Image (cartoon, rainbow, N blue to C red):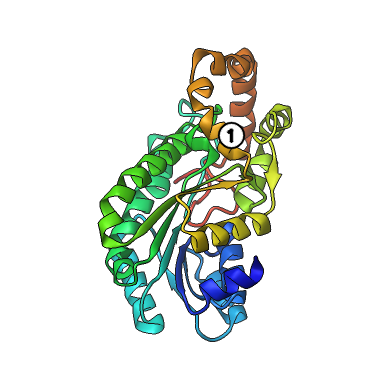
Amino acid sequence: MAADLAGSLKDKVLFITGAARGIGEETARRAAALGARVAAVGMEPERLEKLVAELGPGHCWAECDVTDQSSLDAAVATTVAQLGGIDVVIANAGIANHGTVAESPADVIARVMEVNLIGVSRTVSATVAEVEKRGGYLLLVSSLAAFTALPGMAAYCGAKAGVENYGNALRFELAHRGVGVATAHMGWIDTDLVRDVKADSSTFEDTLKKLPYPLGALTSVEDCANAFLEGIVRRKRRIFVPKAVGIVAAMRPITFSWLGDLPIMAQAKQMVPRLEEQFRKTGRTFGATSAGMGKGRP
């Protein structure tokens, strides 16, 4: 499979948002190792510059906030000027707040939705013309959270569900232009984002341990990046990480029914107050490593 990926990705230009850490960073590294050229985009310039220096010649980076259209347009212009165009977009940038809706400032909830959903749509708008020139591919990073729900994740779940259906409609709109569109649905990936939540809430971690596979499973960033790249090469319409997440997707009529509510609702009255108290003690509304998110504010 590695040889097939290398042959298919060689000299392809991948525009990756949220590339400074986690899934984005690992995907950039693996894509570059397979001969792709990477435009690493994100909000941590020092990390991006270091990453691109490690990748070697033929790559570029740009500081960019995906909620700022002019910032995205500038990142696209930099990529086209330095790498010649864009074949693949991985709209990966995402954040998660720490706290429930009742305990969080309105701007915090809105920021999560703005980055995770509006940021994806702005990324598409900024790149689609360049991707069309090459008959390319858009990978929109959604989540297992598009078709499951846990307390403390209302904004995240809502945004990721929006990404999924945005991608569904976009696939039809761009078919005649030769552009492929996929959504990625991952369970828990071993990233700073997930580690931050675990560090701030033992209740959250305990809840994950009680969930059946794959709902509580933790997958490495290496496996996730490999799944992304395989999906890109095969131009899949859905990428599930791990693959068993696809079974959960098929079961959503049950998951979102009164029957699906029962196991979580049975714990919610005790679990949610503990969750809120643990997040309250940290004094943070976002994780310690969330880029651009200061203590106690969006």
Quadrant of the rendering where the N terminus is positioned = bottom right
264 or 283, which lies in front? 264
Which residue: 42% across, 34% down? 158
Q: Amino acid at mark 1?
A: Ile
Residue 294: image location, x then y, percent: 50, 51
Which residue: 56% across, 62% down? 229
Figure check: 102 above or below 228? above
In the image: residue 152, left or right of residue 208: left
Instruction: Give the residue pinned by disc 1.
Output: 247
Crowding at dot 1, Cα within 10 Å, few <14 / some 14-19 / many 20+, comes out as few
- Visible in this render: residue 73? yes
SS at mark 1 in the image:
helix
Which residue: 55% across, 13% down? 259
Figure check: 84 above or below 41? below
- Visible in this render: residue 22? no
Residue furthest to the bottom in view is: 57
Residue 21: image location, x then y, percent: 58, 61
Give the image quarter of residue 211. top right
Residue 240: image location, x then y, percent: 56, 46
Which residue: 37% across, 81% down? 84
